[in-house]
C-alpha cells in the first residue's frame, strides 16, 4: 500500500473543493453544545479543520450542518454552509454539499468536523495520490490499535480499493481485518451528483453511506485508490474522553514544535499552548504555565511556574512569575519583572519596570524603571467607567497604595506606602495620602482580656 509520506502527483491537479461534514448531533458528548464546537487548545474543533483546509488553497470550502446549528454557522463564516435537513447518513450529507457546489467539476475532498488533528501534509498527500491515476475516488486508510467501530478496507492485488465494509455490516472474519477507513476521501466531482442518486440505504443503519460511492463508481468502470495515513492524526471525537485524548495529542505536538524552535520547557507535560502562541528562542518556560490566545513572547524571556498568560506581548529579558496572571492587552517591556500574584490587564509596562508582589495594574502605563510596590493597585473601575492610570519613569509606588483613576503620576515621583491618591502628582514630588497615626496612651490596656 502507498504511504501518505511517499505520494507524488505526476499529472496536473484539478481544482479542489473541500466539504466538511459537521451535522452530527454528538449525543455521546451529552452536551447542549454542538459537538464540533467543543474545543481543542481553546479553539472549536471545526475551526481546526477549517484552518487545515484553508492551507490547501481550495476553490471552495463548504460545511454541512443540520438545521438550527447557528452557533457553528457563525464560527465557520465566511465559508459556505449546506443544510442536511434529515440525519440520513454521510452520503446524504454529501448530497447537500454537492447541490451547493453547483456545476463545480474538480476534485472534492471530504473531511469531518470532529477529526481536528489531520495535517495539511497528509491531505496534500491524499489529493496527490488521487491525481496520480484515473481514480474516481481515493480513500485515506489507517491502522488503529483497536479497529472496533471502524469500517474495514479490502484491497485488490494491485492495491486499488475492492470494498469497504462498515463494522455493523461486517462478518466476524471481516472484523479481524485491521486496515480501517478514516472516512476522509477525495472524489472526482464529474457526475458525482448522479452517482450519489444511486446510493441505497439497505443496511443495518438504514442510512446512505458515503463509503458506498467507490463501490458504485467501480460498477461504472472507475477504480478507486487507497493510501495509508497516520492514525494519530485521524482519530475522531465521539465523547469527552476522546476529546481529552486529542487535547493531549495536540499539546504534545505543540510542545515538540516549541522545543525544536529553541524554547526550553522545564516540565513539558504541564505547559499548555494555544494555536497562535509565538515564543522566541532561549525563552525558558517553567512548570504549570498556561497560554491562552494571542500571546507573543520575544527571545530570552523567563516565564516562571504557575503563570496564566493570554492576549499579551512580552519583550526580551523580561521575567514573569511565578504565579503571575497577564490578561489581554498586557504589553511587558524589555527586562521588566512581573512577580508572584501580580495581575496585569490592558497595560503597558516599560523597560526595566517592576511589579514584584501582590499587585493589580489595569488600564495603565507604568514607565521605564518604575517600581510598583507590594499590594499596590490601580483603581480603574468605578462601577460604570474604566479609567486610565499613567505612571511616569523612575517612579516609586509604595506598598499598599491605591491609585484612583483617572490619574497621572509624573517622572521621578515617590508615593508613600499606604497612600490613596485621587489627584495627579507632579514630577519628583513625594506624596503621602493616608490618615495620620494617633497614639492614645493606656487605651489599649485590658482591651483583649475576656470577661468571665
Image: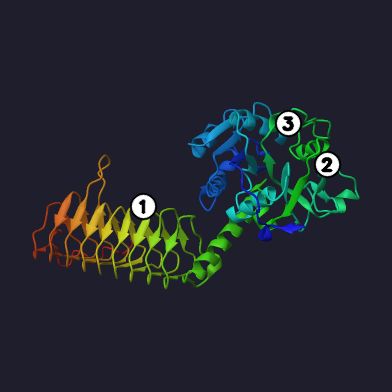
User: Sequence order check: which comes first, mark 2 or mark 3?
Assistant: 2
Q: Secondary structure at mark 3?
A: helix
Query: Where is residue 419 shown, x and y percent of the image?
Result: 18, 60
How dense is the environment of label 3, judged by Cα within 10 Å: few (below 14), some, or many (20 and up)?
Answer: many
Q: Residue 168 has which mark? A: 2
- Is the Cβ of the residue at disc 1 closer than 8 Å to that at disc 3? no
Q: Is residue 150 left or right of residue 346?
A: right
Q: Is residue 60 left or right of residue 234?
A: left
Q: Residue 328 has which mark? A: 1
Can you tell which of label 2 and label 3 is closer to the viewer? 3
Residue pointed to by mark 3:
196
Quarter location, residue 200? top right
Can you tell which of label 1 and label 3 is closer to the viewer? 3
Quarter location, residue 438? bottom left
- Identify the residue at horizontal 85%, vertical 40% (top origin): 169
Seen from the viewer's position, the closer of residues 80 and 405 is: 80
- Identify the residue at horizontal 42%, vertical 64% (top origin): 279
Q: Secondary structure at mark 1?
A: loop
* Quadrant of the rendering where the C terminus is positioned: bottom left
The answer to whether any part of residue 408 appears in the image is: yes
Q: Secondary structure at mark 2?
A: helix
How dense is the environment of label 1, judged by Cα within 10 Å: few (below 14), some, or many (20 and up)?
Answer: some
Query: Where is residue 403 shown, x and y percent of the image?
Result: 20, 55
User: Sequence order check: which comes first, mark 1 or mark 3?
Assistant: 3
* Quadrant of the rendering where the N terminus is positioned: bottom right
Q: Residue 356 has which mark? A: none
Q: Is residue 3 left or right of residue 319?
A: right
User: Sequence order check: which comes first, mark 1 or mark 2?
Assistant: 2
As measured in the structure, the alpha-carbon distance from the residue carrying label 2 to the one carrying label 3 is 22 Å
- Identify the residue at horizontal 56%, vertical 42% (top origin): 37
- In the image, residue 131 sits, relative to residue 257, either above or below, namely above
Amino acid at each position: 500500500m502507498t504511504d501518505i509520506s511517499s505520494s507524488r502527483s505526476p499529472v496536473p491537479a484539478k481544482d479542489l473543493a473541500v466539504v466538511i461534514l459537521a451535522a452530527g448531533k454528538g449525543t455521546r458528548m451529552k452536551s447542549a453544545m454542538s459537538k464540533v464546537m467543543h474545543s481543542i487548545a481553546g479553539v472549536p474543533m471545526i475551526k481546526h479543520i477549517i484552518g487545515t483546509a484553508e492551507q490547501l488553497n481550495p476553490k471552495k470550502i463548504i460545511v454541512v450542518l443540520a438545521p438550527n446549528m447557528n452557533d457553528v454557522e457563525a464560527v465557520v463564516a465566511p465559508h459556505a454552509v449546506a443544510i442536511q435537513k434529515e440525519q440520513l447518513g454521510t452520503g446524504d450529507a454529501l448530497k447537500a454539499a454537492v447541490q451547493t457546489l453547483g456545476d463545480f467539476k474538480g476534485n472534492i475532498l471530504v473531511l469531518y468536523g470532529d477529526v481536528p488533528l489531520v495535517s495539511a501534509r497528509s491531505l496534500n498527500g491524499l489529493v496527490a495520490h488521487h491525481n496520480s491515476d484515473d481514480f474516481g475516488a481515493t480513500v485515506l486508510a489507517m491502522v488503529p490499535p483497536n479497529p472496533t467501530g471502524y469500517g474495514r478496507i479490502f484491497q485488490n492485488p494491485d492495491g486499488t480499493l475492492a470494498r469497504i465494509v462498515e463494522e455493523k455490516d461486517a462478518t466476524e472474519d471481516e472484523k479481524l481485518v485491521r486496515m480501517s477507513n478514516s472516512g476522509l476521501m477525495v472524489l472526482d466531482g464529474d457526475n458525482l451528483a448522479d452517482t450519489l442518486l444511486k446510493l441505497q440505504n439497505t443496511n443495518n443503519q438504514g442510512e446512505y453511506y458515503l463509503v458506498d460511492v467507490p463501490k458504485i463508481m467501480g460498477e461504472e468502470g472507475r477504480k478507486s485508490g487507497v493510501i495509508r495515513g497516520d492514525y494519530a492524526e485521524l482519530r475522531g471525537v465521539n465523547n469527552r474522553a476522546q476529546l481529552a485524548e486529542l487535547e493531549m495529542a495536540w499539546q504534545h505536538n505543540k510542545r515538540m514544535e516549541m522545543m525544536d524552535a529553541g524554547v526550553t520547557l522545564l516540565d513539558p507535560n504541564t505547559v499548555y499552548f494555544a494555536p497562535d502562541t509565538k515564543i522566541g528562542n532561549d525563552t525558558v518556560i517553567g512548570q504549570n504555565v498556561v497560554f491562552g490566545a494571542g500571546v507573543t513572547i520575544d527571545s530570552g524571556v523567563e516565564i516562571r511556574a504557575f503563570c496564566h498568560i493570554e492576549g499579551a506581548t512580552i519583550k526580551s529579558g523580561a521575567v514573569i512569575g511565578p504565579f503571575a496572571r497577564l490578561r489581554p492587552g498586557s504589553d511587558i517591556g524589555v527586562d521588566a519583572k512581573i512577580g508572584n500574584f501580580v495581575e496585569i490587564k490592558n497595560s503597558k509596562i516599560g523597560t526595566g519596570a517592576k511589579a514584584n508582589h501582590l499587585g493589580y495594574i489595569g488600564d495603565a502605563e507604568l514607565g521605564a524603571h518604575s517600581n510598583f510596590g507590594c499590594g499596590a493597585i490601580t483603581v480603574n473601575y468605578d462601577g460604570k467607567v474604566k479609567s486610565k492610570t499613567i505612571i511616569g519613569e523612575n517612579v516609586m509606588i509604595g506598598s499598599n497604595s491605591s491609585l484612583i483613576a483617572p490619574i497621572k503620576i509624573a517622572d521621578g515621583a515617590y508615593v508613600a506606602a499606604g497612600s490613596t491618591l485621587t489627584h495627579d502628582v507632579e514630577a519628583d514630588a513625594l506624596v503621602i495620602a493616608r490618615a495620620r497615626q494617633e497614639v492614645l496612651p493606656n487605651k489599649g490596656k485590658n482591651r483583649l482580656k475576656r470577661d468571665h
